[in-house]
Image: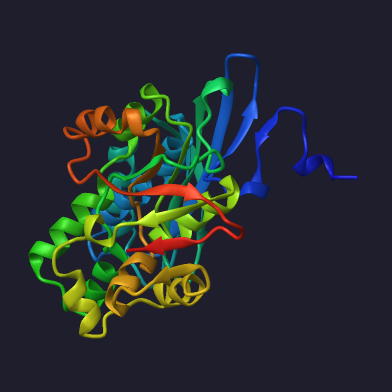
Amino acid sequence: MTHLATSHPDLLVGAATSDDGGVFRLDDDRALVQTVDFFTPIVDEPYDWGRIAAANALSDIYAMGGRPLTALQLVGWPRSALPLDALSEVMAGGADVMATAGATITGGHSIDNETPVYGFAVTGTVSPARVVTNGTAQPGESMVLTKPLGTGVAASALKAGLADPALRDAAVETMVALNGPASTVMVEAGVTCATDVTGYGLAGHLREIVTASGVSARLDMDAVPVLDGIADLIEAGVYPGGSRRNLESARTYLRTSRSSTEQKILADAQTSGGLLMAVPPDRAGRVLEDLRSVAPAATVIGEFTAAGGEPVIEVV
């Protein structure tokens, strides 16, 4: 018998499907979407770290087709090593992004921790009839990505002092950009399958879609948007540990003759990445047109195909 804590008639989406958030039905018209995310500093500037952490936590709500309602802050701070003024800047950045998203910070919890961590538990709302999950992609649907890849490599380059100011600014700009407007386009177009691209990289999150949906995918590497300079950094040896682990896993399901650098881009662990959608082909043009003003990098990067057995991702 399944334990009540993980099973309920109103639990519409739980942990079993590797979706971005959990969905719990309140009534016929309303459901709660809940998620939590926190991490260590990804940039040196406290205010920007706070902004990125907030945008990243909100992204799971948007990927499910929901709208954020409230948020709780999660803080770990080494009080003896870092000034509390820096924490105030982190929290100010998080609050500014939450305000932009229309979410209310209702409280939170902090601990004294050797390593600084910051993030949010976010609750949103969604219509039970319009929940977007990762398990409904159909063969023939277009694969749309709304943000460029490369933030994992960019963050590693920043830590090593190898990123130029232009890359730093471009990476921060894409990470703090909210997926809310793109989510609105997605929901209004009737898209039912999507995820956001974060720690597992594009390849890993695409794998979750094809596995949950029982389809395969054909990815056009030349169409994938990537931050300028990322390929050169990878070829110079800049590649984070999390991305390396993603790459090892991806080699079991990727089918490709593309270069090692390109495969590393696909596996790069992202922070606050874009939405990855399965869009019916007759709606793809409209979706891209509507995305143009809110997610300039949005593009079709491939299509979903019928699975002839175990779902695979072909990269051409």
Q: Residue at x 52, y 59 (%)?
A: 111
- Residue at 44 percent across and 69 percent down: it is 255
- Name the image colouring: rainbow
Q: Nearer the viewer, residue 286 or 98?
A: 286
How many marks the image carries: the answer is 0
- Extreme residue toward the bottom, this view: 237
The quarter of the picture where the N terminus appears is: top right
Residue 59, quarter of the rendered image: top left
Of the pair 120 and 148, the residue shown nearer to us: 148
- Residue at the (26%, 80%) spot, across then down: 238
Tell me if residue 305 comes above or below residue 79 in the rendering.
Answer: above
Q: Is residue 21 left or right of residue 268?
A: right
Q: Position of residue 248 (x, y in %)?
A: 48, 77
Residue 99 can be seen in this image? no
Instruction: Indicate left or right for 86 with 118 as reference.
Output: left
Q: Position of residue 281 (x, y in %)?
A: 35, 34
Instruction: Answer left or right for 153 relative to 31.
Output: left
Q: Position of residue 211 (x, y in %)?
A: 58, 53
Q: Quadrant of the C terminus?
A: bottom left
Considering depth in this image, is 1 or 207 the residue closer to the camera? 207
In the figure, 140 relative to 197: above or below?
A: above
Relative to 30, say whether 113 is above or below: below
Q: Let me know if residue 10 appears in the view.
A: yes
Residue 224, x across and y down, in percent: 26, 56
Please name whichever residue, 221 or 166, is drawn nearer the observer in this view of the structure.
221
Q: In the displayed image of the protein, which residue is found farthest to the right? A: 1
At horizontal 22% and vertical 82% (from top left) the residue drawn is 235
